[in-house]
Image: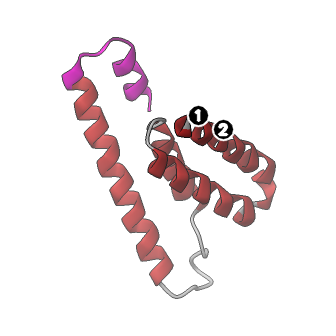
Amino acid sequence: MEQWRLALRGGDTEDIAKITDLIRENIVQIREMKQFSEEQPPSEDRPSGSNASLSALVDLLEIFTDEKELLTEAEALLGELVLEDPVRRKYWRRRQNKISEMLKKTLK
């Protein structure tokens, strides 16, 4: 994420394109990991969901502030985190509200 921010501040278009491609590849990889995890039967050794990977996916999706589809996915994932992580529920709800506001701006 820091590389993305630095590239936007002073990088050239080639750097920004490379980092954007890398972020999109990581989004695909985390989605695949999430899908694989969901397809596995629950066990005592493995928790039913991975909040860390969901959080990472939200962070990556949130970078693309002008893409409604990705923001909508981030908002839905934050809804999952609200339910799955009661300790950080307020934090996840605050982030979900932030994404909702971003979506409203995207629709205008």
Q: Amino acid at mark 1?
A: Lys
Q: Is residue 37 above or below residue 24?
A: below
Q: Residues within 10 Å of mark 1 (few under 14, many from 20)?
A: few
Q: Is residue 81 left or right of residue 38?
A: right
Q: Is residue 89 left or right of residue 58?
A: right
Determine which of the numbered discs, if any, sits on residue 13 in the image. Answer: none
Work out which quarter of the rendered image holds the C terminus and state it.
Answer: top right
Q: Quadrant of residue 42?
A: bottom right
Residue 3 counted in the magenta span: yes
- Name the dominant secondary structure of the magenta segment: helix
Viewer-proximal residue, 11 or 104? 104
- Measured from the top left, where is residue 83 in percent x and y? 73, 65
Q: Find the residue positioned furthest to the top.
A: 10
Determine which of the numbered discs, if any, sits on residue 101 in the image. Answer: 2
How is colour applied across the structure in the image? secondary structure
Q: Amino acid at mark 2?
A: Glu
Give the residue number, with chain letter if any, for mark 1: 105
Of badges 2 and 1, nearer the viewer stands: 1
Q: Which residues are magenta?
A: 1-14
- Measured from the top left, where is residue 4 in percent x and y? 38, 28
> Is the residue under label 1 in contact with that under label 2 (CB below 8 Å)?
yes
Dot 2 falls on a residue whose secondary structure is helix
**Residue drawn 68% across the image and 43% down it:** 95
**Residue drawn 37% across the image and 67% down it:** 32
**Residue drawn 65% across the image and 44% down it:** 100
Q: Is residue 70 above or below residue 98?
A: below
